[in-house]
Every structure is written in C-alpha cells, then in structure tokens.
Amino acid sequence: MDANIILVMLAGALIVEGLAYALAPSLVERLLEALAAMPIETRRTLGLVTAATGIVILWAAF
C-alpha cells in the first residue's frame, strides 16, 4: 500500500470517530456503557468480526 492511502484511511477513521463524538456524545456514552457490560469474549468476537468485515470491504474495493 502506498503511504498516502494509509494516511487517507487513517484520516477517514478519525473523521468518522470525531463526528460521532461531536454529533451524538450521549449515544457514544451509552455505547461505551453497553460495551463495558459485555463479557470480554463477546467484545473480542465483535472486534474480530468488525476487523474481518473491514478487510473484506477493502479486498472488494481493490
């Protein structure tokens, strides 16, 4: 991957995260509370599924 593509992807992630906190801070708080209430294994599985979904989307895009 080109370094510029990595920077664009990082910038996109930061924009999405920043907008979530700016536009719906109470929703983010509720989401964090829900995540904290989940068992560790469930959070780990959720993270792996999310990462795998991102990889599939990137694979399909390129």
Image: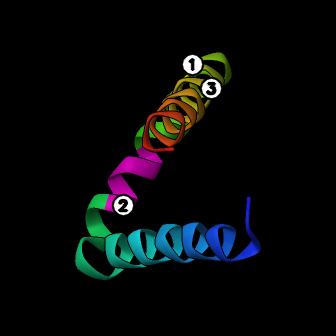
Q: Is residue 6 left or right of residue 26?
A: right
Residue 48 is tagged as 3
Magenta includes 52?
no
Of callouts 2 and 1, the N-terminal one = 2
Circle 2 sits on which residue?
28
Q: Are marks 3 and 2 in contact (CB under 8 Å)?
A: no
Horizontal and vertical percent for residue 24?
24, 71
Q: Nearer the viewer, residue 9 or 23?
A: 9
SS majority, magenta? helix
Magenta region: 28-33
**In the structure shown, which secondary structural element does the residue marked by tag 2 occupy?**
helix
Horizontal and vertical percent for residue 1?
74, 58
Horizontal and vertical percent for residue 55?
57, 35
Compared to 12, does 40 lie above or below?
above
Circle 1 sits on which residue?
42
**In the structure shown, which secondary structural element does the residue marked by tag 1 occupy?**
helix
In the image, what residue type sits under mark 3?
Answer: Leu
